[in-house]
Amino acid sequence: MWHRPDAFRRSLRLAVALVLALPLLPERVEAAPQRVVSLNLCTDQLAMLLAAPGQLRSVSWLAADPRSSVMADAARGYPLNRGGAEEIFALRPDLVLASTWTRRETVFLLRRLGVEVVELAPAQRLDDIAPAIREMAALLGREAEGEGIARAFTERLSALRSAQTGRTAAIWEAGGYTSGAATLSHEVLSAAGLRNLAAYEGLAGGGYLPLERLVAAQPDLILSSAPWPGASRAEDLLRHPALVALMADTAGLMLREADWVCGLPQTLEAIEDVKDAGTR
C-alpha cells in the first residue's frame, strides 16, 4: 500500500528534525565520586574545603598536624591514612587524589588495581591557586562551590598585592634553608612588596643561603620558623651569635609554616603577615 505523498513528506521532515536535534540533547552527566581518598597534604586541604558531606572518606596523617596544615582541626574528623597502596585500596575509593610528588609505586599499584588516581601539581605561583580550586571542584562535582571560593580568592589577592617597596626580605630556616625564585614563598614576598634575597642571590627553588651572605646582605626583614620538638644540629644555626646580632637590629617574623606549605585561600594570610611585619 502506497503512502500518500504529504504523509511521507511529514514523516521525512520529522526524521530530519530529530537527527539535527541530537547534538542539542544534554550529555549524560557523570556521577560525582562518593568515596574520595586523598594522599597528599595539599590535596587533603583542597578536598576538605570543597567536598560535600560524606564524600571525602580519608585524608593523609599530615593534614591533622597543625605545624603543616591550616585545616588540622577539620582533618581530625576524618580517618587518617599513611599513603600505602594496600591501606588505600582497602578503603574502596572511587577516586584517589594524589600529588605529582606522591610515591610512584603507590600510584602505579592503585592504577593496576583499577582505582582512578588523579595527580594534581602543587601550586608554585599565587596565580595557580584559583585554577587549582576549580580543578578540585570539578573532580568532586562541586563546580559552583569552587567557583565562589576561587573568585573570592582572586578578588582578595588583587586587593592585597602591593607595589615593590625596595625593601629586602630573607626566609632563613633550620640549616640555612631558604626559598628562591619559582616558589610559592617567593610569590608571597613579592605580593607583599618585598624583594626576596634568595632570588636576588640567584637561587631558584629551595636551597641554602650561607649565614655569611645573609649577614652581609643586611635584609630589612628576616622570616624564620619556630623550632620543632626535639633537637637538631640544623636548628643550632638559628642560635648562632652572628644571626642573633643581626636579628637584634632587623625586623623579624616567625612564620606560621602551615600558611606557606600549600597553595590555598589561607595563603593570603601569609601575605598579610609579611606586609604587617615589613612596615614595622
Image (cartoon, grey):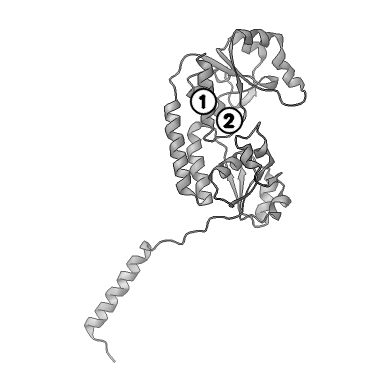
Query: How far across and down, in percent of the image, does residue 202 sit?
Result: 57, 19
Of residues 273 and 22, the one nearer the viewer is: 273
Kindly give the residue lying farthest to the left in the view shown: 6
Number of numbered discs: 2
The earlier-in-sequence mark between 1 and 2 is 2
Query: How far across and down, in percent of the image, does residue 199 sit?
Result: 55, 20
Q: Is residue 183 visible?
A: no
Vertical placement of residue 6 versus 77, above or below: below
Residue picked out by circle 2: 259
Query: How far across and down, in percent of the image, does residue 255 sit?
Result: 61, 23
> Dot 1: few (<14), some (14–19), or many (≥20) neighbours within 10 Å?
many
**Secondary structure of the residue carrying numbered label 1:** helix
The numbered dot on residue 271 is 1
**Secondary structure of the residue carrying numbered label 2:** helix
Q: Residue placed at 55% from the left, 12% from the top?
A: 220
Q: Residue placed at 64% from the left, 41% from the top?
A: 75
The numbered dot on residue 27 is none
Q: Is residue 252 visible?
A: yes
Q: Quadrant of residue 46?
A: top right
What's the amino acid at mark 2?
A: Asp
Kindly give the residue lying farthest to the bottom in the view shown: 1
Vertical placement of residue 12 versus 22, above or below: below
Distance between mark 1 and mark 2 Cα atoms: 9 Å
Q: Are marks 1 and 2 in contact (CB under 8 Å)?
A: no
Quadrant of the image for the N terminus? bottom left
What's the amino acid at mark 1?
A: Ile
Of residues 268 and 204, the one nearer the viewer is: 268
Query: How far across and down, in percent of the image, does residue 153 sit?
Result: 46, 35
Of residues 18 and 153, the one nearer the viewer is: 153
> Dot 2: few (<14), some (14–19), or many (≥20) neighbours within 10 Å?
many
